[in-house]
Every structure is written in structure tokens, then in C-alpha cells.
């Protein structure tokens, strides 16, 4: 669904599992800091609102969005985390650099998620201009950081539910 059709921060809080016993890593890009730190604020507050503790939320910063994947890999290698949330912002410029970065981050996080068996959440704004980024970092379309936090909680809960609901095949 296009962002223009909904506010990313609107969701039914009653349908979100408790994050009380979950541990999270957050990797945030420093490039476009005024945008990425608004995403971080929305993400962090949402995790706390759903029961996560500050002690179970580990935040690292990387220089830019391209480094999100390497930051997520390093964070996941050092800490026992249930999910890693990556937050960044790539604004289209005069060249096609944005396409290379966006594709690399998407592929890298997908690969990390598959290899580790843990959710690696794509909280990367891929926008045409700064105005669109502001709209998605606490502006008129909500905050993508909130959406990333909710996604992480739901994916951890889904994985935990599957682990406890293993069905036996055969006799």
C-alpha cells in the first residue's frame, strides 16, 4: 500500500504482543541524521510502549545507510538479540547511487535474516526528496521507525509461536 494512502504509525496496539522478554538491536545511519534520529526516536519509544526494557535495546550508529548491513552483522555477532532493526534514509540525487544503496541494503538484510534465522527489519526510507523523508519520519505519513518496531515485535512473536507449535508428522 502506498504511504499516501495511510499513516504508517496507525495500528491496533491491542494486536501487538508484549515485547517484555524480547531483545532488540537497532542500527541507525548518521547520514541524514535529522531524519534517521526521528526514526530512531519513534522506534525506541514504540518498543518501550510495548514492554521492551531499555536494557534489552542495543543501539549502534553507522556512517551511512550502505553500512547498515555491516552494522547489523556486527551487532548480531556480539549480542544475543531476537531481532535487528535497521534505520536509514537515502534521498534520490542527481545520480543513481540511491538505487545501488537501496538494493544492497535490502539484499544484505534479507541474507542476514535468512542466515541468522532472526528478523532483520528494513527501516530504510527510499525517497525522492527531503520533504518525503520528513513526511515519513514523524510527519503526515507517520514514522517508519514505529512501523519497523512493530514489525520486529510481530516477527519475533511469530517465530516464538512456531517454535512452540511444532506439529509431528507420522505416527
Image (cartoon, helix red, strand yellow):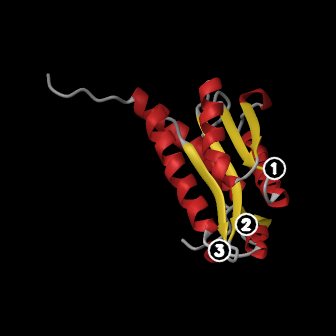
Q: Label 3 near label 2: C-beta < 8 Å?
A: no
Q: Earlier in the sequence, mark 3 or mark 1?
A: 1
Q: How far apart are marks 3 and 1 (CA)?
A: 30 Å
Residue 126, image x, y percentages:
64, 66
Q: Is residue 160 among what the camera can see?
A: yes
Q: In this view, does 105 lie above or below 48?
A: below
Q: Which residue lies furthest to the top in this view?
A: 171
Q: Label 1 near label 3: C-beta < 8 Å?
A: no
Q: What element carries label 1?
A: helix
Q: Is mark 2 on a helix, strand or loop?
A: loop
Q: Dividing the picture into quarters, in which one does residue 154 lie?
A: top right
Residue 136, image x, y percentages:
73, 66
Residue 28, image x, y percentages:
74, 47
In this view, the mark in front (3 or 1): 3
Count of picture labels = 3
Neighbor class of circle 1 (other Cα within 10 Å; few <14, some 14-19, many 20+) is: some
Q: What element carries label 3?
A: loop
Residue holding disc 2: 136
Residue holding disc 1: 41
Amino acid at each position: 500500500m502506498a504511504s499516501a494512502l495511510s499513516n504508517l504509525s496507525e495500528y491496533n496496539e491491542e494486536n501487538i504482543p508484549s515485547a517484555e522478554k524480547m531483545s532488540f538491536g537497532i542500527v541507525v545511519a548518521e547520514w541524514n541524521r535529522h531524519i534517521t534520529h526521528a526514526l530512531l526516536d519513534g522506534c525506541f519509544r514504540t518498543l518501550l510502549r510495548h514492554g521492551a526494557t531499555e536494557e534489552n535495546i542495543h543501539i549502534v550508529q553507522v556512517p551511512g545507510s550502505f553500512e547498515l548491513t555491516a552494522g547489523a552483522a556486527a551487532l548480531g555477532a556480539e549480542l544475543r538479540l531476537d531481532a535487528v532493526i535497521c534505520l536509514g534514509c537515502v534521498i534520490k540525487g542527481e545520480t543513481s547511487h540511491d538505487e545501488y544503496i537501496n538494493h544492497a541494503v535490502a539484499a544484505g538484510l534479507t541474507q542476514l535474516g535468512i542466515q541468522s534465522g532472526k528478523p532483520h527489519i528494513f527501516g530504510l526510507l527510499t525517497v525522492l526528496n527531503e520533504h518525503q523523508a520528513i513526511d515519513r519520519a514523524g510527519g503526515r505519513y507517520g514514522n517508519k521507525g514505529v512501523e519497523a518496531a512493530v514489525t520486529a515485535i510481530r516477527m519475533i512473536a511469530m517465530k516464538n509461536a512456531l517454535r512452540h507449535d511444532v506439529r509431528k508428522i507420522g505416527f
